[in-house]
């Protein structure tokens, strides 16, 4: 609930994508934010103000000269109230006004008076987006610290297709979350997180893998972002959307994950190895699909050990990498096995969980873990959501980094 209690001004301008702003409003509310809506006059031709007022349960502001409650001047009131402003959709016209510092309507006046982060979600026809004037305006906004999300490629209002569709509301929400996190305690720190399973091919159809869903690793990447870190997420194959703002490195095999991790840690302050790399791979990979007729009733595969990524990290650990965190997925002797792994691999922290439990471990949204530090301290955490586990763990990582340990 990172956005809980955050005060957001949602600016809606005159484009067909204004309908997406209705869903964005609902997403912001579900995240716990308070939302005030400002519409340009043009926006009211696409979606009626009553729609936003009914959902937000607040008056929709349109008139440049209207007085807000308690006789405050409207644009000053909104600018000083907001923790963030998000303009979605943002037309080429509004982007040009923002770039020039114009203040000819309530929305542009509010932005000009605000000191909070501003997120802009462009939406327009492809030729308008690719026009050098728009490109220059966007670059000017970026230099001023505006956060630009999208646009995306797809079907446009004209019936054609191309780059210019407003980013989906989920992506805009992620950008708002990212914008509000940039002054967190881990600002200027770099964190690498690994997530998900790996896959080792047997033939072009079959592979060896495990039950890891990647949910814990992705929650950790989001928690690191929420604390202000720059995050590289090295991920095996999963069915999850990467958190907005991460540098995603998609891999498949253990060898690929190891290479990506060894490269990423050269500029990292912390590494959290939440992935579940496959321990073994087939000694021989078949170039064509193996037919059942070729194997008969049995098929014996010879497996060989994969490289141990944490061991490789320990050998190549740069001086900048101050915190190294591992995970121990166990089915018995949880603490004893985790302690052995912590000592053997030179970890600063290890997170152990019993993956045989139905409400913790692989594939579920909750986890029950034991945190062990290098001094032998053991903490048993209750059943929590993976997001709560992730934030608790990242706060511990932050403490270690800030203490210089």
Image (cartoon, rainbow, N blue to C red):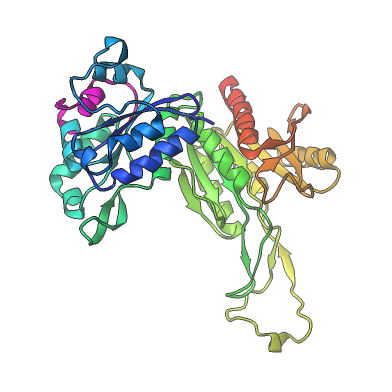
Q: Verify whether residue 105 appears in magenta.
A: yes
Residue situated in front as seen by the camera: 113 or 334: 113
Q: Verify whether residue 114 appears in magenta.
A: yes
The residue at the point 71 percent across, 58 percent down is 279
Left or right: residue 127 compared with residue 36: left
Name the spot of residue 157 as percent of width and height, x first: 23, 55
Quarter of the image with the N terminus in it: top right
Name the spot of residue 116 as percent of width and height, x first: 34, 23
Residue 172 visible here: no
Total count of labels: 0
Position of 25 relative to 71 (above/below) = below
Residue 330 visible here: yes
The residue at the point 66 percent across, 62 percent down is 209
Name the spot of residue 231 as percent of width and height, x first: 49, 39
Residue situated in front as seen by the camera: 199 or 114: 114
Quadrant of the rendered image containing residue 33: top left
Quarter of the image with the C terminus in it: top right
Quadrant of the rendered image containing residue 365: top right
Quadrant of the rendered image containing residue 109: top left
The residue at the point 29 percent across, 35 percent down is 49
Position of 342 relative to 356 (above/below) = above
Name the spot of residue 26 as percent of width and height, x first: 43, 38
Q: Residue furthest bottom?
A: 293
Q: Which residues are magenta?
A: 99-118
């Amino acid at each position: 609930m990172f956005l809980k209690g955050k005060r957001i001004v949602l600016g809606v301008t005159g484009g067909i994508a204004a309908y997406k702003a209705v869903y964005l409003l609902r997403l912001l509310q579900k995240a716990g934010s308070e939302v005030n809506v400002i519409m340009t006059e043009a926006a009211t031709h696409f979606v009626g103000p009553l729609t936003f007022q009914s959902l937000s349960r607040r008056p929709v502001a349109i008139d440049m000269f209207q007085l807000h409650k308690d006789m405050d001047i409207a644009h000053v009131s909104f600018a000083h109230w907001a923790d963030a402003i998000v303009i979605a959709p943002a037309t080429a016209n509004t982007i040009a006004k923002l770039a020039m510092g114009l203040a000819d309507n309530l929305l542009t006046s509010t932005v000009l008076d605000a000191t909070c982060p501003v997120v802009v979600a462009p939406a327009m026809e492809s030729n308008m987006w690719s026009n050098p004037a728009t490109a220059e305006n966007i670059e000017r906004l970026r230099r001023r610290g505006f956060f630009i999300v999208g646009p995306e490629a797809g079907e446009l209002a004209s019936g054609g297709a191309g780059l210019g569709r407003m980013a989906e509301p989920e992506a805009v929400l992620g950008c708002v979350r990212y914008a509000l996190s940039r002054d967190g305690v881990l600002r200027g720190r770099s964190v690498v997180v690994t997530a998900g399973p790996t896959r080792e091919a047997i033939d072009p159809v079959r592979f060896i893998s495990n039950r890891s869903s990647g949910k814990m690793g992705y929650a950790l990447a989001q928690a690191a972002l929420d604390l202000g870190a720059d995050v590289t997420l090295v991920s095996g194959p999963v069915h999850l959307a990467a958190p907005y703002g991460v540098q995603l490195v998609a891999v498949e095999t253990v060898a690929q994950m190891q290479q990506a991790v060894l490269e990423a840690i050269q500029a990292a302050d912390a590494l959290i190895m939440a992935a579940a790399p496959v321990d073994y791979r087939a000694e021989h990979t078949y170039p064509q699909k193996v037919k059942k007729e070729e194997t008969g009733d049995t098929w014996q595969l010879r497996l060989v050990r994969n490289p141990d990524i944490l061991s490789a990290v320990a050998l190549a650990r740069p001086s900048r990498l101050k915190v190294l965190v591992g995970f121990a997925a166990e089915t018995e002797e949880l603490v004893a096995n985790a302690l052995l792994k912590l000592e053997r691999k030179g970890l600063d922290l290890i997170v152990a969980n019993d993956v045989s439990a139905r409400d913790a471990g692989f594939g579920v949204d909750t986890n029950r873990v034991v945190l062990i530090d290098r001094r032998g301290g053991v903490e048993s955490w209750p059943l929590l959501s993976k997001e709560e586990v992730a934030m608790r763990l990242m706060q511990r990582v932050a403490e270690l980094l800030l203490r210089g340990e």
